[in-house]
Amino acid sequence: MDVNYGCVAIGASAGGVQAIRRIVNGLPYQLRAPLLITIHAPATSRLERVLRFDSNLNIQCAIHGMILRPGVIYTVPGETDAKIHGDRFVLNEALRHDGQFASIDSLMSSIAFTFQAAATGIILSGMLRDGVAGMRMIEESGGRTIVQDPHEAEFADLPISVLERCADAEVKTTAEISNWLLEHY
């Protein structure tokens, strides 16, 4: 995997599917970097099918051992922890910590470690704090952190939690996130 192009990860929880759809629909062409998407969802979730309905982009459901490719949008299956090790996905059943999933933190932390300053983490609508620690790791490794504007998010708790702990996090609407991705990747 050529880390020169970097990697983008999006994490969301409650209210996040519509925000993700708006971002992906705002991308008229493939990015130069892989785009990884994880949401809190049941194991039966098929986010890649939902996204493909409105888009002609290359959208795939991540599989354990799958190699990351620039320009592909990967969705993580529901109730799954995804990490990037080298250039591959490592998928495991999501574990609960204090009764809550930490799947967003797992993905964000792994791209911080693998891509360092070339990592971008994006947090969308959600509740609780899964994703906050991973976003801090991205920021500490020199990467970029972006949160959905809390005024636009259906559930603002998660974006607000990130803003409270990540001094450099940028606030953007979903349309602004799509435009930012097109400009930078």
Image (cartoon, helix red, strand yellow):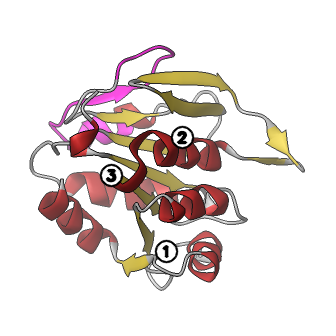
Q: Is residue 15 above or below residue 165?
A: above
Q: Earlier in the sequence, mark 1 or mark 2?
A: 2
Within-10-Å neighbours for mark 2: few <14, some 14–19, many 20+: many
In the image: residue 121, left or right of residue 136? left
Task: Write down the residue under mark 1.
Answer: 153
- In the image, the segment drawn in magenta is 50-67
Identified by mark 3, the residue type is: Ala
Q: x and y percent of residue 73 in the render?
A: 30, 37
Does residue 18 show up magenta in the picture? Answer: no
What amino acid does circle 1 point to?
Answer: Ala
Quickly name the residue at label 2. Answer: 110
- Callout 1 environment at 10 Å: few (<14), some (14 to 19), or many (20+)? many
Q: Quadrant of residue 171?
A: bottom left
Q: How far across and down, in percent of the image, does residue 55 sit?
A: 19, 42
Residue matched to label 3: 118
**Residue furthest top in the image:** 65
Question: In terms of secondary structure, where does tag 2 sit?
Answer: helix
Q: Position of residue 115 (x, y in %)?
A: 39, 44
